[in-house]
Amino acid sequence: MSHPLPALSLLETRVLGTLVEKERTVPDTYPLTLNTLVSGCNQKTSRDPVLQASETEVQAAIDSLKRGNLVVESSGGRVPRYSHNLERVLQVPSQSAALLTALMLRGPQTAGELRIACDRLHRFADISAVQGFLEELAARPAGALVIELPRLPGARENRWAQLLSGTPAAQPQAAQDVSVDDVAALRADLARLEDEVRQLRELVSRLAAK
């Protein structure tokens, strides 16, 4: 890649990821028509977040990706069909393309989660193989394509995110673990408040009776 690509939008990464996914999982229908691509972008499984993109919005994303040579339109046939050019433009092997696809379609994930998510795209032997390709993508001389995110409180593994959409925003802090003592104290406070409410109701009832 002679120059860095502009940051892609969420829908552009969804279109690109869907094309790579469908090429490997349903090759008989690939390249994809606009209608099939819209359905793939909006499907409710293996997608995070779930989108409701229109044909017009998907077509605009396709046109933008075509300008960066990431998507190619096939001529001939009754309707246009679209294929991706991700591996050649980014100069990455198929294993790395599979990882980028899972990250584009499902958002940040740990190496273990990525191994499972990539099973139909590329079967990695173990988590260390996933980790190795992620580290290569993060250390590319032409520019990093993934980044390892800071570990969230309570998490045992770091998650990875793709950088085709630019540097991800700071992740919200996870809720801190609540101890058994904290739960007991909350329950005691709740019981005390419920008792006070009961006493106030009894007082109101007596006053009303007078």
Image (cartoon, grey):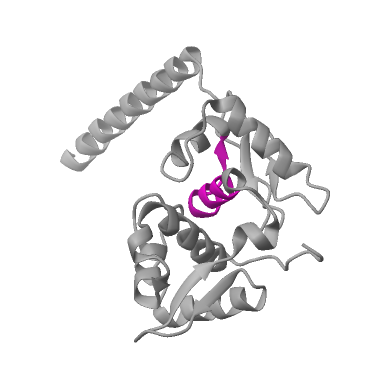
Question: Could you tell me if residue 155 is visible in this image?
Answer: no
Residue 73 drawn at (x, y percent): 51, 78
The quadrant of the rendering that contains the N terminus is: bottom right
Q: Overall secondary structure of the magenta stretch?
A: helix
- Closest to the observer: 96 or 194? 96
Direction front: furthest residue: 76
> For this rendering, which residue is in front, 63 or 87?
87
Q: Residue at x 76, y 49 (%)?
A: 144
Q: Name the residue: 47% across, 63% down.
A: 19
- Provide residue 192's location: percent of width, then percent of height: 38, 22
- Residue 91 in magenta? no
Magenta span contains residue 104: yes
Number of dots carrying numbers: 0
> In the rendered image, which quarter contains the C terminus?
top left
Q: Position of residue 168 (x, y in %)?
A: 67, 52
Residue 46 in view in this figure: yes
Where does the magenta region start and end?
97-110
Q: Residue furthest top?
A: 181
Residue 103 shown left or right of residue 133 in the figure: left
- In the rendered image, residue 51, in percent from the top left (x then y), is placed at 42, 64
Whether 85 is drawn above or below 194: the answer is below
Q: Residue at x 35, y 27 (%)?
A: 196
Residue with the most extreme left position: 209
Q: Front-most of 209 and 26?
A: 26
Indicate the quadrant where residue 156 lies. top right
Left or right? Give the position of 116 relative to 61.
left
